[in-house]
Image (cartoon, helix red, strand yellow):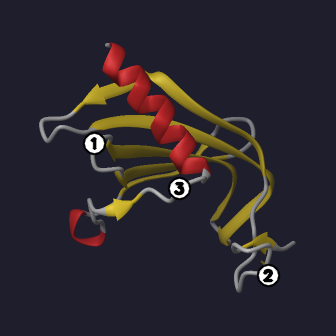
């Protein structure tokens, strides 16, 4: 599989691309944070098994995003992985030292669509 890099150029990335069967965002999970941002949970159901190790094989990934809607920044602060039947495989926070709150949201990306939806909804609540 190749991806467009601008000006119509196609290039295969140096990493395997993962295909999603379904991507969901839980608008009921939106929480406004004290720093002017919001948090929201998303769920990605993958077409194929995701194999991290012999003990972590999953088809569903859930992540709690932090979005700064004003400055178009994001972070992930919690991750769950699950089997296709919903059984929890692993649940882990992303350590504060390992994450940054200044990741720019890439334009025209899946995460930018999720951020736009969550930010619009948060402005109404």
Is residue 111 depicted above or below 38 in this figure? below
Q: Is 15 situated left or right of 92 in this image?
A: right
- Label 2, label 1: how far apart the Cα atoms are: 33 Å
Residue at (60% x, 53% y) in the render: 109
- Label 3, label 1: how far apart the Cα atoms are: 14 Å
Residue at (56% x, 41% y) in the render: 113
Residue furthest top as drawn: 125
Is residue 117 depicted above or below 104 in this figure? above
Residue furthest bottom as drawn: 14
Q: Earlier in the sequence, mark 2 or mark 1?
A: 2
Residue at (46% x, 51% y) in the render: 79
For label 1, the residue is 70
What crowding class fits label 1: few (fewer than 14 Cα within 10 Å), some (14-19), or many (20 or more)?
Answer: few
Q: Give the label on residue 12, or none.
A: 2
- Label 3, label 2: how far apart the Cα atoms are: 20 Å
Looking at the picture, how far across and down is residue 108, in whole percent? 60, 53
Residue 65 seen in the figure? yes
Q: Earlier in the sequence, mark 3 or mark 1?
A: 1
Looking at the picture, how far across and down is residue 59, in whole percent? 72, 50
Q: Depth check: 116 or 74 in front? A: 116
Tell me the quarter of the image containing the N terminus: bottom right
Tell me the quarter of the image containing the C terminus: top left
Looking at the picture, how far across and down is residue 107, in whole percent? 53, 55
Residue at (73% x, 36% y) in the render: 85
Q: Give the label on residue 88, or none.
A: none
Q: Give the label on residue 107, or none.
A: 3
Q: Secondary structure at mark 3?
A: loop
Q: Is 106 situated left or right of 46 in this image?
A: left
Residue 89 seen in the figure? no
Q: Secondary structure at mark 2?
A: loop
Q: Earlier in the sequence, mark 3 or mark 2?
A: 2
């Amino acid at each position: 599989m190749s991806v467009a890099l601008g000006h119509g150029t196609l290039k295969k990335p140096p990493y395997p691309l993962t295909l999603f069967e379904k991507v969901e965002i839980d608008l009921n999970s939106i929480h406004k944070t004290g720093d002017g941002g919001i948090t929201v949970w998303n769920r990605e159901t993958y077409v194929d098994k995701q194999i991290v190790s012999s003990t972590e094989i999953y088809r569903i990934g859930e992540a709690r995003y932090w979005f700064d809607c004003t400055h178009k920044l994001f972070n992930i602060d919690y991750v769950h992985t699950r089997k296709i039947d919903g059984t929890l495989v692993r649940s882990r926070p992303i350590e504060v030292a390992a994450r940054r709150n200044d990741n720019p949201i890439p334009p025209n990306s899946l995460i930018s669509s999720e951020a736009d939806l969550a930010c619009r909804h948060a402005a109404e609540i």
